[in-house]
Amino acid sequence: MSDAPTLGFPESLSEKYQPKTVTDFIGLAGPKTVLSNFVAQPYPSAWLFTGESGKGKTTMALAMAEQIGAELKHVPSRDCTLQMVTDVAYHCHYMPWAPKKFWLILVDESNEMTPPAQDAWLSKLDATDKIPNTVIVFTTNDTYRLAPRFQSRCRVLTFNEEPTAGEVVSMLRKIWHLENHRELPEPDFEAIVLECAGNYRSSLMKLELALLGLRPPETVKVEVQSPQALAYASRKRQRAASRSAQPSPVALQSTAVASFLSELETKIGKQPAAVILQKACRATGQRLYVDGKIGHVTIKAVNRVPEPEFMAALQAQAKG
């Protein structure tokens, strides 16, 4: 008997968790709003879904077919010849099997249609030879090969609204806890989404590989600072460099300052000596914090000056 681990999903995650209704999609706020209103009150119409691969165009059309109760006719673009258009249109003139009420013709990658096929659709998309009880959805990655008159007969929806990273991460985490029957350690979902550039389908495939035992990527944490924070940090570094380049600043540990203050206290008393010290500090741009004794004065580094300059100011205040 094989000891290989079994998986809790008999189909790919992208198939198993593909959205079943229009509102199940993440992202795509614009198309979701329009199509949610449409499936609530459907009517025969033609749609052109444009956008890059993996944005959910085909899946959205399948969800529409399910919600409006439509019989699906899925036409690959390379098979969409003039004869195929004629045959599909003829078939859809009959009512679908009950309880279906509509037909939904889905033509994928419609920009690959042959020119005769594209021309054949023109009459089917307006009143000339309109197909009854039918919704037609064309999907395409780009529109440069589709004639303007063809596009003008369709309701064009652009699928370019990416789901937020948070939405994709939340969905991956939910699926992981539903499918992680082997009790594997939780991967870094943010790293998966980052590696897949936010693409939901690609992220699901990476998650599937993680469930199969492949070690997923790890996020490289990058701290992003605001311009204000960066400017503040720059000024702080400049001040530190400036201080390190200056001579030793005034400090209570200075033997010259301590000796001078001690002699001054003996001559005129502690309080007058403290006043002189304060005046010397103000004259040199220093700021004083006194805890009650001259010998325990602390000077905060504000525009610090070299000790000789401070001593000169102190002596000038004492003479004055």
Image (cartoon, grey):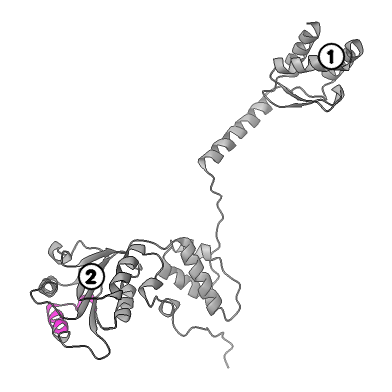
Horizontal placement of 314 versus 80: left or right?
right
Query: Does 86 appear in magenta?
Result: yes
Residue nearest the viewer, comparing 310 with 125:
125
Name the residue type under label 1.
Pro
Q: Position of residue 54 (x, y in %)?
A: 36, 68
Please give the label number shown on residue 47: 2
Residue at the outermost right position: 266
Check the image and report above or below for 164 versus 116.
Answer: above
Residue that appears at 38% across and 71% down? 23
> Looking at the rendering, which quadrant does residue 70 occupy?
bottom left
Q: Position of residue 96 (x, y in %)?
A: 22, 88
Q: Looking at the rendering, in which quadrant would you find the C terminus?
A: top right
Q: Residue at x 41, y 79 (%)?
A: 15
Q: Nearer the viewer, mark 2 or mark 1?
A: 1
Residue picked out by circle 1: 272
Q: Is residue 213 visible?
A: no
Residue 207 in the image: x percent, y percent?
Answer: 49, 72
- Residue 203 spot, x, y in % from top left: 45, 68
Quarter of the image that includes the N terminus: bottom right
Specify which label sits upstream in the sequence, 2 or 1. 2
Q: Residue furthest front?
A: 41
Q: Are marks 2 and 1 in contact (CB under 8 Å)?
A: no
Q: In this view of the protein, can residue 220 be seen by the observer?
A: yes
- Mark 1 packing: few (<14 Cα in 10 Å), some, or many (20+)? some
Of 316 and 12, nearer the camera is 316
Q: Secondary structure at mark 1?
A: helix
What kind of secondary structure does the magenta stretch mostly adopt? helix
Farthest bottom residue in view = 1
What's the residue type where badge 2 is placed? Trp
Q: Quarter of the image holding residue 317?
A: top right
Query: Residues in magenta?
Result: 75-89
- Give the CA distance from mark 2 to mark 1: 92 Å
